Image (cartoon, rainbow, N blue to C red):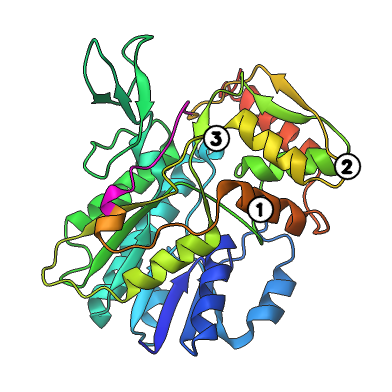
Amino acid sequence: MRSVLVTGGAGFIGTALIASLMADDIDVVVVDDLRPQIHHDPDEVRARLGSVLREADVRDERFWRGLPSVDAVVHLAAETGVGQSMYEVDRYRSVNVDGTRNAAHFAADHDVPIVFFSSRAVYGEGRWDCGAHGPHTSSRCCRDAQPAASRETDPVAPVSIYGETKAAAERLFQDGAAGDVPVSIVRPQNVIGEGQSLHNPYTGVLAAFLACLREGLPVQVYGDGHQTRDFVHVSDVVAATRMLLERRPSTTDVLTVNLGSGRRTTLVELADLAIAGAPDGGTMEFVDVHRAGDIEHACAEVTWARECGLPTPGVTVDDAVARFVADGWTRQGAPAAAWEDALGLLRLRGLAK
């Protein structure tokens, strides 16, 4: 493999991926619109990426026709804020579905494999195990039900517009939008690590925690903190993506696979890890908030990923959080008030209480 097109390549995962590819002398073409909500300093990104950057909107079909031939495509470009998706519906659907369709058609036209980044959000409330009612998905049946890891074979049941758009984008590939080229659909859990955006108040609970800690404020944990997430370090996501790029299946079946650690971490545990990593420590407080599209629990079943030969994550959650805090402590980021402002907008629209 000599060249890879990476959409959303100026973002968090994309930046780590292209660094890995370029370290192995693989040419990259980066497509990104450098949206200010994500990229606080677009000029820095332009200077850093130079001639490999194609600044454009993935929804623009004409732009795709002018791109050079490559050996593979990684489609990361997306709008990703769950709360924001509930009121910016048209933009999320056009970027996440129409943009993905363009990427699929490009891969088909050039007869090259494509790795598409979907999301854990397609599972919605996920899988539950219950002694009284048996295993089931989508919603908790009773108090006895316990959260279980989501499997790739589980039915999709998103509870946010963002999740719906990712599920719709997956269906494009399942319906043949990329023709007969190898297609890998990855469903990452919460990806964390160095270089993560500190400016987007609609994504990244760790960025919110960090903003509070840097200002000497208590870390705000929404709800009672029992909610769980599955955190995976960006380097492990890059390693899995690199392996998928080399995949040469004997059939044209679409491969769908979870990317996660398979370990549950409560928000209280996450806050404790962030506080432990801060130079001066910190405290936490609980805030009674529920936002539309939020879920209680998320965790990936990773058996299929191992059977597919994808590597076991090498960075623990504890180390991943510590590295994130150490990296982010001196980087410029949004103030803690930005998350309060975003929550206020959701309340005004009746999407938070």
Chain-order first, disc 1 or disc 3: 1
Q: Amino acid at mark 3?
A: Gly
| Residue 351 shows in this picture | yes
Q: Residue at x 74, y 34 (%)?
A: 341
Q: Amino acid at mark 2?
A: Asp
Give how far across and how far down residue 316 sits, in percent. Answer: 55, 51
As rendered, which of 196 and 176 lies closer to the eye?
196
210 lies left or right of 252: right
Between the residue at mark 3 and the residue at mark 2, the CA separation in whole angstroms equals 31 Å
Between the residue at mark 1 and the residue at mark 3, the CA separation in whole angstroms equals 14 Å
Q: Is residue 92 above or below residue 244?
A: above
Q: Residue at x 47, y 28 (%)?
A: 295
Q: Which residues are magenta?
A: 295-304
Few, some or many residues within 10 Å of mark 1 (<14, 14–19, 20+): few
69 lies left or right of 343: left
Give how far across and how far down residue 26 sits, in percent. Answer: 46, 87
Q: Circle 3 sits on which residue?
A: 83
Q: Main secondary structure of the magenta part?
A: loop
Q: Circle 1 sits on which residue?
A: 37
Few, some or many residues within 10 Å of mark 3 (<14, 14–19, 20+): many
Chain-order first, disc 3 or disc 2: 3
Q: Amino acid at mark 1?
A: Gln
As rendered, which of 295 and 316 lies closer to the eye?
316
Q: Does the magenta run of residues contain 297?
A: yes
Circle 3: element type = helix
Circle 1: element type = loop
244 lies left or right of 353: left
Question: Cβ–Cβ below 8 Å for labels 1 and 2?
Answer: no
As rendered, which of 1 and 181 lies closer to the eye?
1
Q: Circle 2 sits on which residue?
A: 280
Q: Is residue 23 above or below residue 178?
A: below
